[in-house]
Amino acid sequence: MTLITQFSTLDYECGTDEAGRGCLAGPVTAAAVILPLNYSNAILNDSKQVSEKNRNTLKSIIENDSVAFAVEHIYEKDIDKINILNASIKAMHTSIAQLDVVPNFISVDGNKFKPYKDVPFQTIIKGDSKYLNIAAASILAKTYRDAYMEKIHEEFPMYNWKQNKGYPTKEHRAAIKKYGITKYHRKSFRLLPEQYRLDL
């Protein structure tokens, strides 16, 4: 794992990232985080590069150390209505709006964003593995979304969301084929390969 050495050089620079864009069920979740200037953390990295145990450890550390943080879910009905890209950006905007501190700059993971008020921003491809504030947002988005999926797993255990978190695994798609869909599935997504017919 590469240690992230790039950190904010601006007061109140916000990092934002999302989790769950490619899932078949559940919300897309975004977080916004403002870290202190010159903040460092030896294990903080892109959530995909960090073990589940370390993600959960980092969640508490980020919440304690950050100047401000917020997390927002955008649920299936909105995703189906406005599409996953717009839902992801809406989740980012809403999380930024909930910060206790107004950011002076927004660092965004990826290459798609829409202006938030008049705050300057920059999109950064693979930003969650380059900038600590985006990595912190990545950790919070992932841990909060995972917790949500584990909660709704209890309602529909046959899809094993506790394990697959709603992603399109073979097991998840096999369960959709066998049991059909739930209120948590995204109807605008291709839930099964084309050779299978699914009545929505």
Image (cartoon, rainbow, N blue to C red):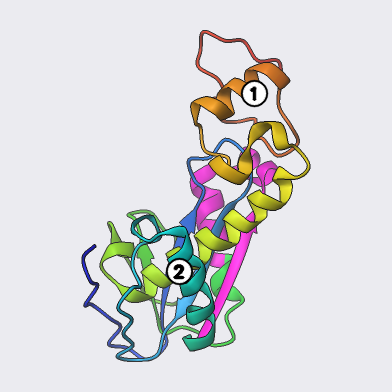
- Magenta span: 67-93
Return the residue at label 2: 137
Q: Amino acid at mark 2?
A: Ala
Q: Which mark is residue 176?
A: 1
Which residue occupies the foreground of this view, 60 or 103?
Answer: 60
Query: Percent from the top left, x then y, of residue 169?
Result: 49, 31
The correct choice, above or below, for 12 with respect to 196 in the image is below
Query: Percent from the top left, x then y, of residue 115?
Result: 44, 66
The correct choice, above or below, for 125 with respect to 153 in the image is below
Query: Percent from the top left, x then y, of residue 26?
Result: 64, 44
Magenta stretch mostly in which secondary structure?
helix
State which quarter of the image contains the C terminus.
top right
Which residue occupies the foreground of this view, 54 or 108?
Answer: 54
State which quarter of the image contains the N terminus.
bottom left
Q: Is residue 115 visible?
A: no
Residue occupying the point 49% across, 73% down: 57
Q: Residues within 10 Å of mark 2 (few under 14, many from 20)?
A: many
Q: Secondary structure at mark 2?
A: helix
